């Protein structure tokens, strides 16, 4: 399992490199369901001139579009999110951590703390109201 974690984080790092090449803050992520990458995202705030276009939000929107095209019901979408794991290079900010918690993402692995805006323990612990913790730090 640890080798899988590292492989998924490497994919997130690749997304972060793409963000950096586009002069964005180098954050990237992938969303995994049943051992497969089903979405990825990278920061696009500068490119889109939209402060909400963080890597996690990009990946979430990609999934929602795909599931909408597939005609999935709201109940199925909610169930799907509850089976997803997110790997992200930096601790999700407060906005993204709240979104992940609202969606019911099963687990979040991040590569480093976000001491300015972290919503998974560094500043706030938005997941702490859950019955079981879903945040894990992946130390590379």
Image (tube, rainbow, N blue to C red):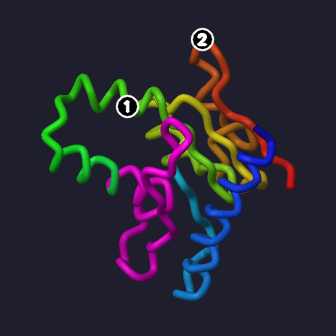
Q: CA distance from mark 1 to mark 2?
A: 19 Å
* Camera-side residue of 111 and 4: 4
- Residue at 33% over, 54% down: 61
**Mark 2 or mark 1, which is nearer the start of the sequence?**
1
- Would you name the residue on which mark 2 appears? 131
Q: Looking at the image, is 106 positioned above or below residue 47?
A: above
- Residue at 60% over, 27% down: 127
Q: Looking at the image, is 55 positioned above or below residue 21?
A: above
- Would you name the residue on which mark 1 appears? 80
Residue 109 location (% of width, % of height)? 68, 43
Pick the quarter of the image with the C terminus: bottom right
Around disc 2, counting alpha carbons within 10 Å, would you say few (fewer than 14), some (14 to 19), or many (20 or more)? few
**In the current view of this chain or complex, which residue is farthest to the top?**
131
From the image, state whether disc 1 or disc 2 is nearer to you: 1
Residue 115 location (% of width, % of height)? 76, 53
User: Mark 1 falls on what kind of element?
Assistant: helix
Pick the quarter of the image with the N terminus: top right
- Residue at 67% over, 22% down: 133
Question: Where on the picture, by quarter, is residue 46?
Answer: bottom left
- Residue at 78% over, 55% down: 112
Say whether residue 135 is left or right of residue 70. right
Q: Which residues are magenta?
A: 32-61
Is 60 included in the stretch rendered in magenta? yes
* Camera-side residue of 73 and 70: 70
Q: Looking at the image, is 33 positioned above or below residue 102?
A: below
């Amino acid at each position: 399992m640890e080798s899988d974690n590292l492989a998924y984080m490497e994919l997130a790092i690749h997304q972060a490199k793409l963000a950096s090449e586009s002069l964005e803050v180098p954050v990237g992520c992938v969303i995994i369901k049943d051992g497969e990458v089903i979405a990825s995202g990278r920061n696009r705030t500068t490119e889109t001139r939209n402060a909400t276009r963080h890597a996690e939000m990009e990946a979430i929107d990609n999934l929602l579009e795909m599931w909408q095209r597939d005609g999935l019901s709201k109940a199925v979408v909610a169930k799907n999110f509850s089976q997803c794991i997110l790997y992200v290079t930096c601790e999700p900010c407060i906005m993204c951590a709240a979104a992940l918690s609202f969606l019911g993402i099963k687990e979040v692995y991040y590569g480093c703390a976000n001491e300015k805006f972290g919503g998974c323990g560094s500043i706030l612990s938005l997941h702490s109201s859950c019955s079981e913790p879903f945040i894990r730090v992946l130390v590379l």
